[in-house]
Amino acid sequence: MATYSFQDKPPFSSRTQQQAIDDEIHALEYDKNSEKLQPTANDVRDMGLFGIQPTFTRRFKFVAMVGFASTVVMCWQNTLATFSFALNNGGTGGYFFTYIYGIFAFGFTYLSLAELSSSYPTAGGQYQWVAQCAPHKLRIPISYFVGWLCSLAWLGYLAGCGVIIGNLIHDCVLIYHPDSVAANTQWFPTIFAIAALLLGGLFNSLLSQHFPALEGIMVVIHVASWVAFVVVLWVTSPIGDAKDVLLTFNNGGGWVNPAGATLIGVLTACSGLLGYDSAVHMTENTRDASYTIPWSLMISYFVNAAMGLVAGVTVIFCAGDLDEVLANGTQAPFVTIFYNSTQSKAGTVVMLVPIMMCFMSSQISETATACRQIFAFARDNGLPFSDKLKRVPDAEVPQTALWAVVAATLAITCVNFGSAVGFNAIISLVSVSLTCSYVMTISCVLWHRFRGGGLPRERFSLGKAGVFINIAALCTMSPIMVLAP
């Protein structure tokens, strides 16, 4: 492969216009002569900022990465799968207004992270950005702390996705056999969660070269199932009165008042908005990452946030009697809502199949995200047994990190055999850890800006609005971080 050297090149901030033009010409020539799955000149140059040599095959291009970012979170499906907590804590009105709040809070946050992913494109994400922007004396401890937060968060995220798949299979059984003893045991969804986890590991280990194709297929299913779900509910359901739906607040959790309950439910209402930074951890598998990652992150976020809003509004207007929905016994209340609207067992199961397929795709994508986060952190010696976890036997997947992730997630999932409460307490650390990492990262960037420090050349730049967007992100995300525990 052609080499691209950055020796004796001045920093971007001090280069003349002619030097910048010459560098771009050099880069274009490099890209023309390189193979299509190899890093571009921009990739090599950007990783050179960290002293890292490109390791992985770059299979993801722009469209595939938009698909990856969309399907790893599964916004509208994820929001509905965790719908019951938001209905108990805030009701339909609380759900609607907290989701709107979440769109803005996470929008400001992801804009801030997208700019950083363009300036510092590396699979480490937040912890490496903190290392570049935090106060000098605190860079190592803060970076280490954020690295652990992100690593643990993605393990919990992965475990939670598997149990959602198990819960949806449980709901399919209850539709036909509401008195099933087996389906109503704690081990039933856990077994399917473990099966999904192992399948995700095997796909990443053996079939990772087909990842972009999988994402393309799943994006089609993701959008088509959303259209079908929304249209069927609006056509077959009695529509609630707007005043009753949007101004009904519930305090089923026994908090001081409905306002307090609504605040507690904010993160569950926004669960489908959490985790779009997963695209960042695929940076080193993405061609022309400093452009592809930030733009795919933002496009996928805003499109899917809008889809989640439409799906959420559809469900709260078509829900009917909420007490009946919550008392029905299904793990995901939207299953009961869909069945009540259609009065068709077969139709409800058919609707659930593509949703479960989407969650299985999410399981595979989250496994990829988690193992690359672990690999990057181990490469910087941030984890025990880092010398083993950072091994990459081929140019596709960090296999040791992959199976370490599967083993750790398996241990977390097995907690669900004994206690659903204990399991939910563990995976709730996902929201705490990720929101905390967002706030700490953006805080360090703001400190860096106020000290007069600039970011390296950005291909996704917030310009002069960057400071204001960073401040807005902190102001809107900090309450979520405080409420999450």
Image (tube, rainbow, N blue to C red):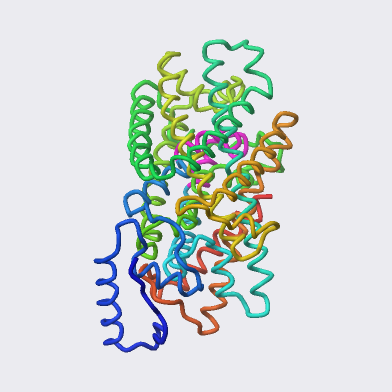
The picture places residue 2, in percent across and down from the top left corner, at 33, 69
Magenta segment range? 76-99
Of 177 and 414, which appears nearest the observer?
414
Residue 29 image point, x, y percent: 25, 72
340 left or right of 65? right
Q: For residue 86: magenta?
A: yes
Question: Is residue 114 placed above or below 177 in the rendered structure?
Answer: below
Is the residue 467 above or below the residue 391 in the image? below
Task: Judge from the rendering whether residue 24 lies leftward or rightward of residue 244; answer left or right.
Answer: left
Quadrant of the frame with the N terminus: bottom left
Residue 9 or residue 470, whichever sits in front: 9
State the residue in front, 211 or 484: 211
Compared across the picture, whether 253 is left or right of 44 comes to right
Q: Nearer the viewer, residue 314 or 217?
A: 217
Residue sitting at x 67%, y 75%: 138
Residue 141 on the magenta span = no
Quadrant in the rendering for residue 124: bottom right
Determine the residue positioned at 66% across, 69% down: 142
Q: Main secondary structure of the magenta part?
A: helix
Give the residue at x 62% y 59%.
436
- How many numbered discs? 0
Residue ID at (63%, 46%): 404
Q: Position of residue 430 (x, y in %)?
A: 62, 48
Residue 157 occupies which quadrant of the picture?
Answer: top right
Looking at the image, is 112 positioned above or below residue 336? Answer: below
Q: Position of residue 109 (x, y in %)?
A: 49, 60
